[in-house]
Amino acid sequence: MKIGYCFTGSFCTFEKSINALEMLVNKGYDITPIMSENAYATDTRFGKAEDIVKKLEAITKKQVIHTICDAEPIGPKSMFDILVVAPCTSNTLAKLANGVNDTAVTMAVKSHIRNSKPVVIGISTNDALGAAAKNIGILMNYKDYYFIPFSMDDCINKPKSMVCDFGQIERTIELANEGKEINKKIL
């Protein structure tokens, strides 16, 4: 299975997402990394951007797609069976829910979904139970969007924050490929 694997700016979850990506590669999935421009170029306390890019390219043996121009051909060339966005920030959720395509990741999704192929979303936002909730709801009701199970990550200190279960990425991908949403009965 060919997968486009997108990273947006939830830098605190990059390590978990990279571990999930590496597990998928080790299981034989053909993965191309895609990063929003901010994810591609921003150094944070969680790591230097250049080091993260090099790690993704070493794991996948492919260059990171990180510009709108490089992401646009994804749909016309039918490059992937599935597109994963994990982590997916509230900013990216809002853009996807409202048809805004101004990053490599949002263009990748727009381009990919035109072929009615699945997009798997891995939420990671401090605002999931706030302003981002409506965008999550919108995308949950759109055809071809599938969500990795997610829950509150720190209900005391971050009462609106939710993060996906990165351990469920592969199962969500398998089910999305069959047109099924993961749920408690399937887990």
Image (cartoon, rainbow, N blue to C red):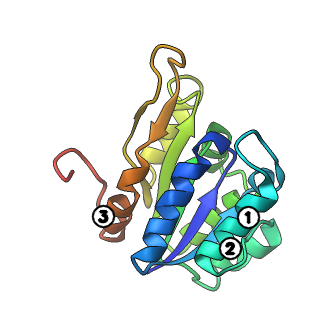
> CB atoms at circles 3 and 1 under 8 Å apart?
no
State the separation of the CA atoms marked 2 and 1: 6 Å
Crowd rating for badge 1 (residues with CA inside 10 Å; few <14, some 14–19, many 20+): some
Specify the farthest residue to the bottom. 77
Which amino acid lies under the numbered mark 3 shown in the image of this protein?
Leu
Quadrant where the N terminus lies?
Answer: bottom left
Q: Earlier in the sequence, mark 2 or mark 3?
A: 2
Q: Which residue is mark 3?
A: 175
Q: What residue is shown with label 1?
A: 53
Looking at the image, which is closer to me, 63 or 75? 63
Nearest the camera: 65 or 146?
65
Q: Is residue 157 above or below residue 49?
A: above
Dot 3: element:
helix
The one nearer the camera, 66 or 140, is 66
x and y percentages locating residue 28 in the rendered image: 42, 81
Along the line of sight, which residue is nearer the eye, 91 or 171?
171
171 sits left or right of 29 in the view: left
Q: Residue visible at 64% across and 45% down?
A: 98
Residue 160 in the image: state x and y as whole percent. 52, 22
- Camera sees residue 104: no
Q: Nearer the viewer, mark 3 or mark 1?
A: 1
Residue drawn at point x = 72 percent, y = 51 percent: 100
Residue drawn where x is 59% and y is 25% of the image? 131
Q: Is residue 65 visible?
A: yes
Q: Amino acid at mark 2?
A: Glu
Residue 57's disc is 2
